[in-house]
Image (cartoon, rainbow, N blue to C red):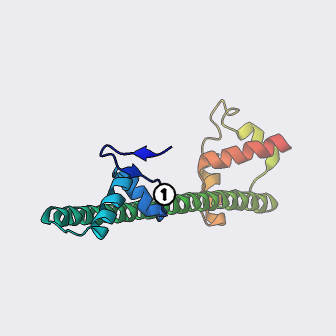
Amino acid sequence: MKYVDKHGEEMKQVPIWLPAALHKLVKADRMNLSGFVRTQLEELYSDTATVESIHEKLRLSEAAKETRSRHLEKIAGEEDRKIRLRENVRRVKEDRISAKVAEQDEADRADAHARKLRDTWLVMVKKKKIIEGGLLRRLPENDHDLDHVEFWPALAQDISKLAGEPYSEQEVIAYAKLQVARV
């Protein structure tokens, strides 16, 4: 069956090939691609080139350039956005890694601190400066008459001096409780 347009002219449908990016632009601008191509071909093969048709051709050419320009700007904007997103992801990964490293460093320092307390404690036991058998009655919860109030601050100070780093009275008491529980 033949297709006839509103002017009574027989129309023929033909496929054309366009670059995918150009086709996206045409669709985004809602251009009548068939009408555009038809107008351009009619102008190409017409015998008369009127001023109006030249202006129309110029207008269509400018519209195509503007559409292409907008498309290129959009692509550039998308690239910038992708770069910013990649940078944000990289920054978040680096922050997480540095947090893990800092956390591991803190854990290592805490382990080293605890090992130094244990080693210093053992040295003081060997030198008989700490007698583990008498610790149970000196613990604050067992010292009802407050006879050994001065013992723990002095012990913490002695351990700190020997270890070369500060230990609080509470750390020393907690370690002493572990030793009493072990015995």
Q: Residue furthest left?
A: 51
Q: Residue at x 54, y 63 (%)?
A: 94
- Regarding mark 1 in the picture, which secondary structure is present there? loop
Looking at the picture, how far across and down is residue 5, in whole percent?
Answer: 35, 45
User: Is residue 87 among the parts visible in the rendering?
Assistant: no
User: How many numbered marks have been drawn onto this rendered protein structure?
Assistant: 1
The answer to which of 69 and 104 lies nearer the viewer is 69
Position of 156 compared to 19: left or right? right
Q: What is the quadrant of residue 73 in the picture?
A: bottom left
Kind of residue at disc 1: Val
Looking at the picture, how far across and down is residue 100, in whole percent?
Answer: 61, 58
On screen, residue 181 above or below 80: above
On screen, residue 52 above or below 2: below
The residue tagged 1 is: 14
Q: Residue at x 30, y 59 (%)?
A: 39
Q: Which residue lies furthest to the top in this view?
A: 144
Position of 44 compared to 128: left or right? left
On screen, residue 54 above or below 23: below
Q: Residue at x 66, y 65 (%)?
A: 162
Q: What is the quadrant of residue 57 in the picture?
A: bottom left
Looking at the picture, how far across and down is residue 48, in whole percent?
Answer: 20, 68
Position of 79 compared to 64: left or right? right
Badge 1: residue crowd in 10 Å (few <14, some 14–19, many ≥20): few
The answer to which of 38 and 173 lies nearer the viewer is 38
Q: What is the quadrant of residue 50 in the picture?
A: bottom left
User: Is residue 167 among the parts visible in the rendering?
Assistant: yes
The answer to which of 86 and 4 lies nearer the viewer is 4
**In the rendered image, which quarter contains the C terminus?**
top right
Looking at the picture, how far across and down is residue 127, in whole percent?
Answer: 78, 62
The answer to which of 80 and 145 lies nearer the viewer is 80
Q: Which residue is drawn at 44% across and 64% down?
A: 83
